[in-house]
Amino acid sequence: MDDRPARVVIVETLAWAALVPMIGLCLTQWFGIEGSRAITALQALTPWFLVWALPIAVVATATRRHPLALTALIPLVTLLALSYPIVFNAGAPKAATDSPRITVAYANMLYSNTTPDQAARTILGADADVMVLVEVATTVHDAVISATPAGDYPYRAERIDRGAGAIGVWSRYPIASGGVLEVERRPTVDVVLDVDGREVRILGVHPYPPTHNAGGWSAQLEAIGQRAASSTLPTIVVGDFNGSRWHPSYRALLATGLRNSHEALGQGWSASWPMDRGVLPPPFVRIDHALFGGDITPVAMEDVDVPGSDHKGFVATFAFTPAA
């Protein structure tokens, strides 16, 4: 017979009950399990969910409930392992002292944006060399066109007739090759720019949300990684990945050799979604990224609020490395 006070039994039972879904989430991370909307949604909350194992571990240790304390360590160790690249990142590679700077402005414009004119003025106000715009559907696209000075961004590759799948890359540098293609049935921009005589590859991407099509999203991330790894050119992959470091498919994409600019510049804990004021929760996950690979490196990153959008945008500055 358990002679402990009922209050103690209830608290310990609740602690065990809280750890069960945490262990389940850890299993999805260890074995790369996705494949369903619920799992991918929960994985986006990984740090905010697993961190609650800490008070359980502390209290269990203090009260000598060793099985409970040891079990609570499982989520904590998992969280530490997943967070290690953010906390102990290697930093961005050094830029060559004589390298030109390349600025890339990115925004998910939200295809149903009710203030497209403001959104257009904001992203154009970055005065970037290159703009990567997703969900730049017809109405939003018209607003960007109207706000763009005549003759600016003369080099464009875009597909604007796909609603939330609309995407475009606008550049002040000439497009030497490439254009819009379908990657796993999703429009993607893959172009090579001539940057003062040097070639830079830009991929503008926007995979399906995993909460709508988890299998298609995972396949698209894999295909994006394969495309990015197919070239030795300095490469920048920019867009709404609908995935974060807390998703196995996104980590598999990074394993192809790409690195995250926010993380490399010490901003790995920043969040970009959601940005719907007053309805959705505060931003809790970064799903909008600028990845880089090859002889190029980020030297600055600034997040930007995009009026009417549910995502934060950013302006990233890149330079060539000494090896370029």
Image (spheres, grey):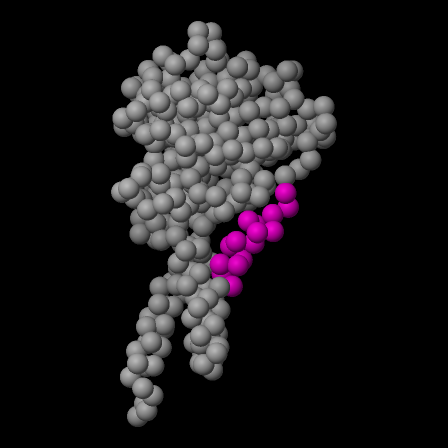
Give above or below for 202 relative to 279. above
* Number of marks: 0
Q: Is residue 316 visible?
A: yes
Residue 189 highlighted magenta (yes or no): no
Q: Give how far across and how far down residue 67 sits, in percent.
A: 45, 78
Q: Give how far across and how far down residue 135 sits, in percent.
A: 35, 27
Residue at the location (57% across, 43% down)?
266
Q: Nearer the viewer, residue 209 or 85?
A: 85
Residue at the location (40% across, 20% down)?
121
Residue at the location (35% across, 67% down)?
18
**Figure quadrant of residue 60:** bottom left
Q: Report the magenta stretch's main SS.
A: helix
**Figure quadrant of residue 16:** bottom left
Q: Quadrant of the N terminus?
A: bottom left
Q: Give how far across and how far down residue 240 sits, in percent.
A: 41, 35
Q: Give how far across and how far down residue 210 sits, in percent.
A: 35, 43
Magenta range: 77-91
Residue at the location (50% across, 19% down)?
127
Classify residue 225 as left or right of residue 306.
right
Classify residue 289 as left or right of residue 319.
left
